[in-house]
Image: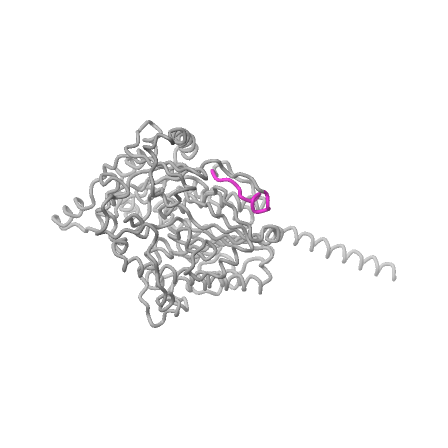
Amino acid sequence: MKHSFKTIYFLLVLIFLHEHSLLAQKNDKPNFIFILTDDQSYGMLGCEGNQIVKTPNIDQLAKEGVQFTNAHITSAICTPSRVSILLSQYERKHGVNFNSGTSLSEKAWNYSYPVLMKKAGYYTGWIGKNHAPVGNGGYRSGLMESSFDYWYAAHRHLSFYPKERHDIFSHAIKDTQVEVIEEGVMDFVDNENKLKGAVFFLKNRPKDQPFILSVCFNLPHDAGAGSMELRESDDDIYKTMYRDVEIPLPENYISKKEIKNPKLPTDLLLTENRQNGYDYVDTPEGVRERYIRQLQAMTGIDRMVGNLRKQLKKLHLEENTVLIFTSDHGLFMGQFGLGGKALCYEITTHVPLIVYDPKNHLNNEGKVSDELVQSIDLAPTMFDMANISIPQSFQGKSLYPLIKGKDQKVREFLFTENLWSNQFGNPRCEAVQNKEWKYIRYYRNNNLSLYKKTEVANLLGISVKKIQSTVHDYDIVVYRDYIEASLQGEEPVYEELYNLKNDPSESNNLIKDEQYSIQLREMRQAWKEEIMFARGMGTPEVLRYTTESNNEFEVKK
């Protein structure tokens, strides 16, 4: 009898150990929280040398993880950059921008990192802003929302007070963007699924299931910072912080009235057509006020990061949760008299990137890497860390070897581009760079002037807003030509060559200096190779998304 009891006890122990082993196997995949800010140039964090901003929590994250000081996006404007992150593809490959007249097809979306990670067993969440049109009807298709296990987000801009712009946030306790997003983040991490307004497809996340949460801000973007009203209900961060500090103007700042030698030829960058939302860069007062608001937003985001890390520790999730912090692109704040983005200069392409991996942080504590890395590298990096097969459609490279402590070159050259060229004056441009040199080429800007469109709209009583923002079927043809033209032999009308080591602010164009003819020849050859790789093979997997298709969509509904 005693022998049988011992046998039963032994079998129960074996069963327990087996079940525990299976649970451990299920839990060995890391969780991911991917934090994406909006319009955050490199240099807006304390760990990047900013002496004014207070970002202690993000600075600590950098100390414990790997800080990449030479990280760049692919296209310096919201939609194409965010699609590039989702698909790990250059814009020239995925074919979606504000002026493209397209949305991602379901086939393309099925190869995005959230969908593929869900198929690989991850519980997926998206909180904050989405600026990537997906499916038939773009933002109205419902495809993106239904792809996630947890959705607490809205399409396009959120404003600083998102409850007043999007119904999904209307039940949030707080009014301000960072805090509204934080409520969603905490609800997701706590696994409570109690937040009214949030859409979730399981009552609770299974405890043995890994998760990937994307947290996307619309700050310090002007749509957020520019709509701050210093309301009584706002946190003190957003009312008083930095207002008692002397705010210096950016390096190479030039007010509008002082511009004598424009950065680019006046028939190439048509600054008179610039969106009026960037007019604050024209005066020192305007720049200082906007910069204060941006710094306030960064401190608010930093506080959320701190609260998130405390909650992860409280829930015993900190030892298996990877944190990634980056931005979709940077922003001109009056440097060289410029405002906005959608160019290939460092100010617009160079972004923060911090990766904290708790399993490797002791080996990498305080590690700083100047390797040439790019936003398209983030999806393959997560896949590599999660032991998920990286699809052939991805164009980025895994940074996991660097995160594990290996010192290896990621790429020799890095390619960026701007295909957002329309009535707002920006030219098409492409750039290739290594750690020392950068070569930029520009193409003829034949776009119809914004002022001519506005003049006719006013004359005929047409909505100026509609004529400025609508995209038509014909624009698809124009955009497709933008993708292929330089590959088919279109010559640049203007070129730039910069020595980034000696001239990181890109002030001195060396394109006509004969002593750098060898470097110029090498960079032109690199451009040729990199743009062919960026284009890839085949036709972009996109759908028609224009004024005409939207009208047809409404009729079908």
Q: Residue furthest front?
A: 515
Res 537 visible:
no
The reply, left or right, for residue 50 in relation to residue 317 is left
Q: Residue furthest bottom?
A: 232
Q: Quadrant of residue 476?
A: top left
The reply, left or right, for residue 426 in relation to residue 170 is left
Measured as percent of width and height from the top left, residue 134 is found at 39, 46
Task: Name above or below for residue 356 compared with residue 402.
Answer: below
Task: Name above or below for residue 526 compared with residue 186.
Answer: above
Res 64 visible:
yes
From the viewer's side, name the closer residue of 151 and 362: 362
Q: Residue furthest top?
A: 489
Q: Quadrant of the N terminus?
A: bottom right
The reply, left or right, for residue 432 in relation to residue 317 is left
Magenta-drawn stretch contains 398 = yes
Measured as percent of width and height from the top left, residue 424 is found at 25, 45
Magenta-drawn stretch contains 407 = no
Give the magenta range: 395-406
Q: Residue furthest left?
A: 459
Q: Quadrant of residue 290?
A: bottom left
The reply, left or right, for residue 109 in relation to residue 469 is right
From the viewer's side, name the closer residue of 30 and 447: 447
Q: Residue at x 58, y 59 (%)?
A: 317
Measured as percent of width and height from the top left, residue 113 is found at 48, 46
Q: Residue at x 47, y 50 (%)?
A: 353
From the viewer's side, name the closer residue of 238 and 255: 255
- What is the magenta segment's predominant secondary structure? loop
Task: Name above or below for residue 278 compared with residue 377.
Answer: below
Measured as percent of width and height from the top left, residue 226 is found at 31, 59
